[in-house]
Amino acid sequence: MPYMQAVSFKQSFLSMINSITVDLNGQSMIQQNQLIDIYNHFRLLTSESWTSQNRWSTIGFYPDVAEAGGFANAYSKFAPATTTTNNSILNEGLTERLKYILDDTDPMLSGVATSSLSYLIYKTELSELYVSHLSTKTAGSSTSFPVLQYSVKAIIMFKDIHHLFEVMPISKSLNFKIQIFWNNSVATATHDATNWTSQSSQFRSYNGTLPLMLNNVSDGFNGATAGTLRASVYVGDTCYDTTQTAFAGVSTGGVGKQVELHVQAVQMLEDIENNYAQNHLRDVSYHDYY
C-alpha cells in the first residue's frame, strides 16, 4: 500500500480537541477558547521527559525530532532538496507514533513474511478489545479507490487538556458540566507521484485545526501514480464524509460509538474522610488562557 504512512496524528491525540468549557456547581470555570490544542501540545513538549515515556503510547504522543523541519539533499527521493523533510527516515517521532496503530498483516519479524500479527491475534479480536488498529485495508483497482480505515482508541487525560484538572484535589459533591468541541475535519492533498503539490482542509461547524499530518511517503509513494489523497477524522465509529462513504470498503470502525468518561473514585474510612475534610481545605489556583 503506497499510503500506509501517508497520514498520521500530529504530536498526540490532544490534536482532536479544539476547545472545552467547564461549569462547576453552576459557575463557569473554563470559558470556550478555540485552538487550545496548539497550546496543549506546547505544554506536552515542554513538560514531558523521557522518565514519563511509559504513558506516551497511551496518549498518542512522541515528539517530532528536529530533523523533521530541516533540509536534506541526501534523502532527495523522500523529500526533494530545498523542501522540508517529514518522513519515517528522518522523523523518529512520526515512526514511533505510527507504531501505536497495529496492522494485523504486518510481519513481526523483519524479513519474515510468515510472521504477521494475525497469527497471534485476529483483527476481530483487536476490534473487540478496542485496540488501535487498521480496521479496513482495501486495494484499489481500475474502477475503485484504495481505502485505509484506522480505528484508534484515543485516550486523552483531563490534566493534559487544562491546568484546572491537574491541580484539583480529592473532592466530592461536585457537579461538573463539561463540553468538548472536536476537530472533526477532512483534508485533501494532491501529489505528482513524488511530492505533495497542493492541500486543502474542511472543518465541520467551525474553524479549527487539522489533527492529521501529511507525510512524505518513502520511495516516491512506492511507485504510485499521481493522484489525490482524501483523509478524514471523526470521533466515534462512523465516517461522516459523504465522499469517502461512497468508496468501496468503508465500513463501521472497530471503536465505540461515543466518548467514554473515566473518573477515578476513592473510598475512605469514615474517620479518615472526616479528618481529610477538616484539615485539607484549600484554595485551588490554576492557569487559564484567552
Image (cartoon, helix red, strand yellow):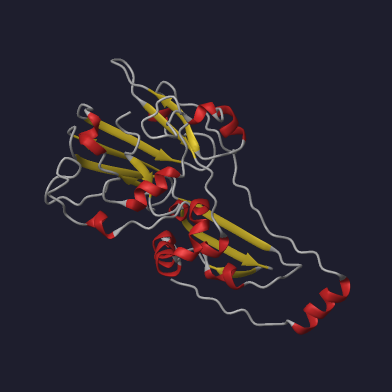
Residue 257 % position (x, y): 59, 38
Q: Nearer the viewer, residue 257 or 160?
A: 160
Q: Residue furthest right?
A: 270
Residue 185 % position (x, y): 40, 44
**Quarter of the image where one finds residue 49:** bottom left
The answer to whether any part of residue 211 appears in the image is no
Using residue 133 as the reference point, say whether residue 244 is left or right of it.
left
Q: Quadrant of the C terminus?
A: bottom left
Q: Nearer the viewer, residue 238 or 69?
A: 69
**Quarter of the image where one finds residue 232:** top left
Q: Is residue 99 above or below residue 174?
A: above
Q: Quadrant of the N terminus?
A: top left
Q: How many marks?
A: 0
Q: Is residue 58 above or below residue 129?
A: below
Residue 233 % position (x, y): 43, 41
Q: Nearer the viewer, residue 166 or 33?
A: 166
Q: Nearer the viewer, residue 10 or 121?
A: 121
Using residue 246 as the reference point, say whether residue 27 is left or right of it.
right
Residue at left 41%, top 55%?
Answer: 62
Q: Is residue 89 above or below residue 265?
A: above
Residue 265 % position (x, y): 74, 61
Residue at left 33%, top 52%?
Answer: 92
